[in-house]
Amino acid sequence: MTALQTPEKTSRRKELRRNIFVDLYARALLFYEDYRRLAQGIGVVLLALALAVPGYIYYHQQQEEAANKKLGQIISVYQRGNYEQALNGSGSQAGLLAIADNYSGTDAGNLASFYAANALYQTEKYDQALTYFKKFEKENNFFGASALAAQAKIYENRGQFQRAAKLYERAASQYKNDLTTPRYLLSAGQAYAEAGQYDTAITVYRKIQENYPESDQATRAKRYLARAKVQQKQTSS
């Protein structure tokens, strides 16, 4: 009986192996098909990117040129102190607000945000000025430091002294020089003192004396330092 059953078992094992092979083959085909579709999809995406990048570069260049041209046309109005006209433009001449909003992705559009913010500040539209000062992308240069200091001044006028002080300190470190840095640090010290943070104010005043002893602010810092020490003792007693 055993000898008669052997061929049957052998044929079943062969059939089983054949079924496994067929199953593996089918899976391999499915994997290949999925991979081929994925590869085709990636290829389409890469092709689309290859076609889109030059178009985007060209578009950005066109936007930059347009923003530069519009900013050049209105900047003289701003420099003459005609802030309302500079902000809103006149006739076919675009104003700073429109340039800042419509060309925000360009260098000229970003600079328009700074000028718009300052013009709004000069016309006492402080909330709107703050929006554009925040919108302005700040670099480590005079404009970046000035924008931070202007934000600080707005918060200071609102009575938010601690927030103002931190922004003044950021302005001082944003663009370090012997002219503006001690000025911003002095404003930071005064704001800290107004916030009741006399320890921090004293530290800032001492920094001015140590790092900028020849500045006009160093003399004032000495006076404010003495005052902050008295206030510190009064609050601790």
Image (spheres, rainbow, N blue to C red):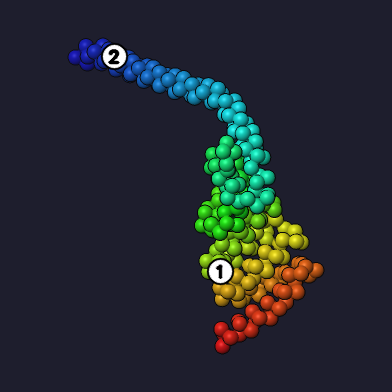
Q: The N terminus appears in which quarter of the rendering?
A: top left
What residue is drawn where x is 78% and y is 70%? Answer: 213
Please give the name of the residue rendered at 24% of the width and 13% of the height, measured from the top-left corner.
Answer: 8
C-alpha separation, residue under disc 1 versus residue under disc 2: 85 Å
Tell me: residue 125, above or below residue 50.
below
> Is residue 188 depicted above or below 177 in this figure?
below
Disc 1 element? helix
Residue at x 69%, y 72% (from the top left corner): 205
Q: Amino acid at mark 2?
A: Glu
Give the left or right position of residue 154, taking residue 19 as reference: right
Using the image as rendered, state which of residue 192 and residue 126 is in the foreground: 126
Identify residue for label 2: 15
Residue at image point 65% right, 46% down: 77
| Mark earlier in primary sequence (1, 2) | 2
Label number found at residue 161: 1
**Spot occupied by residue 236 in the image (x, y as percentages of width and height):** 56, 84
What is the secondary structure assignment of the residue under circle 2? helix
Which of the two marks, 1 or 2, is nearer to us in this view? 1
Q: Which mark is residue 224?
A: none
**Rendering quarter of residue 227:** bottom right
Name of the residue lying farthest toward the front: 91
Residue 135 in picture, x, y percent from top left: 55, 49
Q: Is residue 140 visible?
A: no
Measured from the top left, where is residue 198 in percent x and y?
A: 61, 76
Name the kind of residue labelled 1 in the image. Phe
State which quarter of the image contains the C terminus.
bottom right
**Horizontally, is 50 left or right of 227 in the view?**
left
